[in-house]
Image: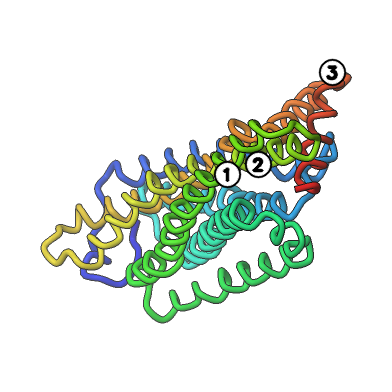
């Protein structure tokens, strides 16, 4: 793709590269749009009345930013890469650049907010329940979007190539540090909780003790999702970071290599937006049940929820509140 302002601006991309990038963008769009739309629909419908919490507010904020990737960035990528493949003039390239940087910055910052949310819930559960309200979650989300809209305007001053370097060393690096720090802290807290569970199990089995064990297990299940998300984040963003550094720091790289790095770092970043909702469906029981309920309803099949399914949703909510 003809991006940025370096010595490769006037050098055309390899013949097949634009078509490969367009095809990959199309495939990612087919995953990103329905997956993230289903997350938003699940929280909006909330069939079992257990999804409207501060935690799921961050989840839906992440889904909205990823949905923008699927509905705006990826279609623009398909269109512009096909034009480039057929050697047609590219107009308004800034539109794909700005939508890409805004939505992807929001996506990675929302991932950072989710990891801090989980770390706080595990390490300081009583303070977490008391302090994190929907209003405060809204304020955090507003700050994330404000930063996501403001930061990419640097692109108009420095161009695409250099701004990828800024993006890599601000939003991505910040989120990676948050991921690693909260992951280490959560492991320590989980070890302490395991010892507490063992003590509670060995002591008198009062209703209060059983509720504490269930609440801790519920939080651990959610936290395990973010271990998977950390792995996904590293798989998607580590190759992208390497390519961004190559584009900006490798003076001996050929234009052929620069073009490949430009397109592939773009694709790797988009992969995260496509895969995030499938983590929720896979690991979070409340989301998985809501997805199944909505999909069955969409098919026109009238479903009667099993008694234990509804009770599980209510129990999970009451357990978290009682913690």
Q: Which residue is mark 1?
A: 193
Instruction: Kindly report which numbered mark, 2 or 3, lies closer to the viewer in this rendering.
Output: 2
Q: Position of residue 122 (x, y in %)?
A: 60, 51
Q: Which residue is mark 2?
A: 216
Question: Which residue: 84% across, 29% down?
Answer: 311
Q: Nearer the viewer, residue 76 or 150?
A: 150
Callout 2: helix, strand or loop?
helix
The earlier-in-sequence mark between 2 and 3 is 2
Q: Nearer the viewer, residue 2 or 152?
A: 152
Q: Residues within 10 Å of mark 3 (few under 14, many from 20)?
A: few
Q: Residues within 10 Å of mark 1 (few under 14, many from 20)?
A: some
The earlier-in-sequence mark between 2 and 1 is 1
Q: Which residue is mark 3?
A: 301
Q: Quadrant of residue 93?
A: bottom left
Question: Which residue: 72% across, 35% down?
Answer: 286
Question: Which residue: 34% across, 51% down?
Answer: 238
């Amino acid at each position: 793709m003809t991006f940025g302002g370096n010595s490769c601006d006037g050098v055309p991309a390899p013949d097949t590269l634009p078509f490969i990038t367009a095809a990959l963008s199309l495939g990612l769009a087919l995953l990103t749009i329905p997956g993230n739309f289903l997350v938003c629909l699940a929280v909006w419908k909330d069939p079992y009345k257990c999804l409207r919490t501060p935690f799921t507010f961050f989840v839906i904020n992440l889904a909205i930013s990823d949905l923008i990737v699927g509905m705006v960035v990826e279609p623009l990528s398909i269109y512009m890469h096909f034009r480039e493949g057929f050697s047609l003039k590219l107009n308004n390239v800034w539109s794909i650049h700005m939508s890409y940087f805004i939505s992807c910055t929001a996506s990675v910052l929302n991932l950072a907010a989710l990891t801090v949310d989980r770390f706080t819930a595990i390490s300081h559960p009583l303070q977490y329940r008391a302090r994190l309200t929907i209003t405060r979650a809204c304020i955090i989300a507003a700050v994330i979007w404000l930063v996501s809209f403001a930061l990419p305007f640097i692109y108009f001053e420095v161009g695409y190539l250099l701004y990828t370097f800024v993006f890599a060393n601000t939003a991505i690096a910040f989120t990676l540090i948050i991921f690693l720090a909260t992951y280490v802290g959560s492991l320590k807290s989980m070890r302490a909780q395991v010892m507490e569970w063992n003590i509670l199990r060995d002591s008198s089995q009062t209703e209060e003790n059983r509720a504490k064990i269930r609440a801790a297990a519920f939080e651990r299940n959610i936290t395990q999702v973010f271990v998977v998300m950390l792995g996904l984040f590293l798989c998607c963003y580590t190759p992208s970071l390497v390519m961004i550094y190559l584009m900006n720091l490798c003076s001996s790289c050929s234009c052929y290599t620069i073009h490949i790095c430009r397109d592939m770092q773009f694709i790797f970043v988009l992969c995260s937006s496509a895969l995030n909702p499938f983590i929720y469906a896979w690991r979070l029981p409340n989301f998985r049940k809501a997805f199944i309920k909505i999909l069955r309803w969409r098919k026109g099949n009238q479903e009667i929820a099993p008694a234990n399914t509804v009770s599980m949703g209510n129990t999970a909510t009451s357990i978290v509140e009682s913690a």
